[in-house]
Amino acid sequence: MKQLVVLSGKGGTGKTSVAAALAHLAVPETSVVLADADVDAANLELLLQPARLETHDFRAGQTAIIDADACTACGRCAEVCRFEAVVPGPAAYCVNPINCEGCASCTYQCPADAIRMQEAHAGQWFRSDTRYGPLFHAHLFAGQENSGKLVTLVKQHARLLALDTGADLLIVDGPPGIGCPVIAASAGADLALLVVEPTVAGVHDLERILGTVNHFGVPALVCINKADINPARAAEIAAYCQEQGVPVAGPVPYDDMVTRAMVQGQPVTAYAPDGAVTRSLWGLWEQAQARLRANGEH
């Protein structure tokens, strides 16, 4: 079983559209399991129209809880809280869960032992069924942390199912940027497909994410999306990739057909099978397959 993770140095490059298209192009010759690792803003499901099979709570981090009956309103908890999470109430102190960082200082300092730490309900994760294979995805609640932990959970369940069912490929739609969620999404990947736009900051964004995957030893393949909207910048990105010894797949042209496909909840390769974007994505998929095979031989 191979793992392909689709990443970008910033959001909005078309990463999810590319991931959905690859899932469509892979079947039926390749059995696929999908994971949407962008838990802060998961949207792969918008293009795959999944049927939800399972819903599970995600708990991570801790929040302080004050027992109003035991609280003596001495105010010591508010004094030691550096995050201004403890506030006075009508008869006792209470905790604003949005501000609480789970440090437990108030718990240790409370003379009445009226404060306890409780694991926070930070989000949910789901298992769904799509036309192209099982999909694991999640929703991290607003203001919650531990997105890297949730990404790891989502990916772990997807990987285990892929191994149990003998699937050929795990496609991970990764989060944007270079932070902990990206590192969690990239762990164990056989190939990172880096989607970049020909913008002023295009090379900088690519440099960031390429440095991240290189640091963790994940081979990379670059896709220049909407390359024809700025050929000069696209050429600049291609030249940078050549300097770094990173192959470039594509390029993929701009076409508003991609937007129309999104509105219809379909990958563009399914919505417009004869379009220019689809032809480019076929070439991208063939190059990704070749790279995955080559990486498996080492």
Image (cartoon, rainbow, N blue to C red):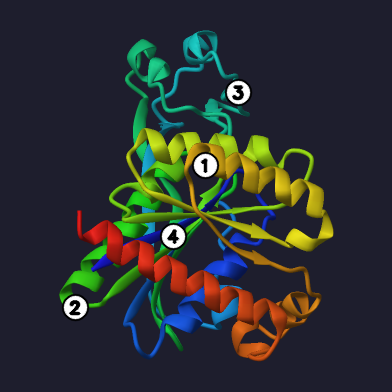
Give the side of residue 57 with respect to residue 75, left or right: left
Q: Is residue 208 above or below residue 188?
A: above
Mark 4 Cα-neighbour bin, 10 Å: few <14, some 14–19, many ≥20 = some
Q: Amino acid at mark 4?
A: Gln
Which residue in the protein does label 1 denote?
144
N-term-proximal mark, 1 vs 2: 1
Work out whether mark 3 precedes mark 4 in sequence or the reverse, and give the earlier one. Answer: 3
Q: CA distance from mark 1 to mark 3?
A: 20 Å
- Image location (x, y in percent) of residue 16: 58, 65
Q: Which residue is mark 2?
A: 166
Any mark on residue 87, and which? 3
Q: Residue at x 57, y 24 (%)?
A: 85
Res 124 label: 4
Which comes sooner in the sequence, label 1 or label 4? 4
**Tag 4's secondary structure?**
strand
How far apart are the two marked residues, 2 and 4, measured between alpha carbons?
26 Å
Residue contact between numbered discs 1 and 2, judged by CB atoms under 8 Å? no
Query: Crowdedness of circle 2 by 10 Å Cα count: few (<14), some, many (20+)?
Result: few
Q: Is residue 175 visible?
A: yes
Q: Nearer the viewer, mark 3 or mark 4?
A: 4
Q: Residue 257: give x, y in percent of width and height.
A: 77, 80
Name the mark nearer the viewer: 1 or 3: 1
Say which residue appears at 60% left-offset and 77% top-offset: 47
Cβ–Cβ under 8 Å for marks 2 and 4: no
SS at mark 2 in the image? loop
Label 3 is placed on what type of residue?
Val
Q: What residue is drawn where x is 63% and y is 81%? A: 278
